Image: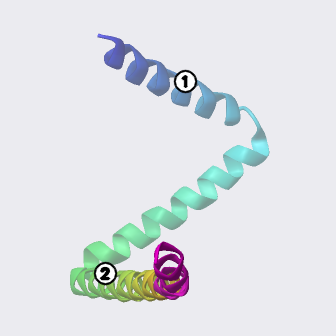
Amino acid sequence: MGKNKLCLGMLIGAIVGGVTALCDRETRNYTKYKMSGVKRQANYYLKHPSEAVRNAQTACNQFNESFNSGANNAINALEQVEDTMNKITKKKDPKKIESTM
């Protein structure tokens, strides 16, 4: 029940905020301008669905490349940290062995 109230409150708040913002003439004009651009682009993609699919595929490929690059960078950083930790540990080990003898 609490989750429903939260979602309903957020929805009502968004609607009230949007209506309040549209009371300003400049905001209304900006919204009309942006919505006409969205409409124009939607109509274009409705007439050229193959281009929409190609653009979506290109965007997915770019995301995958960026994600793989970031993952590789993270792995390299972790390997460097591991190497550094191994060097520090190896330097301390001989001292421990000598002190215990």
**Vertical order, 73 against 25 (above or below):** below
Residue placed under numbered mark 2 in the picture: 60
Q: Residues within 10 Å of mark 1 (few under 14, many from 20)?
A: few
**Vertical order, 11 against 49 (above or below):** above
**Vertical order, 43 against 27 (above or below):** below
- Counting from the top left corner in percent of width and height, residue 47 is at 27, 78
SS at badge 2? helix
- For the residues carrying marks 2 and 1, which lies nearer the camera in this image? 2
From the viewer's perspective, is 92 left or right of 55? right
Amino acid type of the residue tagged 1 in the rendering: Gly
Q: Is residue 95 magenta?
A: yes
Image quarter of residue 59? bottom left
Q: What whole-number distance in Å separates the C-alpha atoms at marks 2 and 1?
A: 34 Å
Instruction: Compare residues 74 and 68 and report the one nearer the observer.
Output: 74
Determine the residue located farthest toward the front in the rendered image. Answer: 101
Residue placed under numbered mark 1 in the picture: 13
Instruction: Compare residues 6 and 79 and report the one nearer the observer.
Output: 79
**The magenta segment:** 86-101
